[in-house]
Amino acid sequence: MMVDRILDAGQQMLITHGYDGASTNRIAAAAGISPGSLYQYFPNKDAIAAAVIDRYSDELSARVAARVSERLSQPAPDYVRESIAALLDALDVHPEFLRAVMEQTPRLGSGSKLIAFEQRIGDLTKAYLTINQKQIRPVGSHDTAAWMLVRMVEHLCVRYILDQPPIGRDEFIDELTVMALSYLRPWPTPPEDCF
């Protein structure tokens, strides 16, 4: 399908040349079509980049949600660790493209699919918190707890892939699991003051 060829070429050009260097001429050449043919499908480079990011977000969402939703009945340590590993695996497929997505999404205003991905994972997290509420500390709102957890895990996984710190993958997953579980762990007695 022509649209897929253009999106594949657009993704490759974003990886190879970055957003600024990924011209419509380069994308058309990589797709094996003329620039005029490309414009029959997309009006400009921004539209191609936004469509590439949307496709990536859909694939990411499907990969992670499938693995996470299968484990809603697992004990918290296993569920959290597996959820982090699933996200890390999905994000680590194309680190160069992940960098392009993180750099270009705010500029393009094409965050709707990424927001939908976060919402989907947040909904699964809320479901887990509801099913397992006796295992965790009382939270004011499962919505708040899910939002905090999803953003914390997502941000640290993205930074881990892009920054490539000298931390082994298993160690990273273990440490992030401890952070997430500590957030949810019941307090022996509720603190009067956190500091």
Image: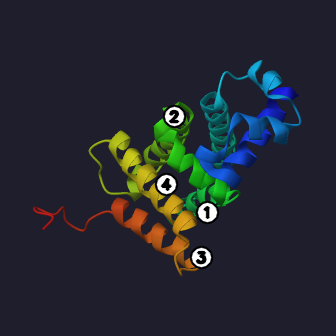
Q: Residue at x 30, y 49 (%)?
A: 139
Location of the C terminus by quadrant is bottom left
Q: Nearer the viewer, residue 132 or 86?
A: 86
Instruction: Say whether marks 1 and 2 touch (CB < 8 Å).
Output: no
Q: Is residue 75 rendered to the left or right of residue 54?
A: left
The disc, 1 or 3, on the residue closer to the chain's N-terminal end is 1
Q: Is residue 140 rendered to the left or right of residue 84?
A: left
Residue picked out by circle 2: 108
Q: Residue at x 64, y 49 (%)?
A: 64
Instruction: Say whether marks 1 and 3 touch (CB < 8 Å).
Output: no
Three-letter code, disc 3: Asp
Residue picked out by circle 1: 85
Three-letter code, disc 2: Leu
Front: mark 4 or 3: 4
Residue 192 versus residue 175 in the image, above or below: above
Q: Residue at x 85, y 29 (%)?
A: 34
Location of the N terminus by quadrant is top right
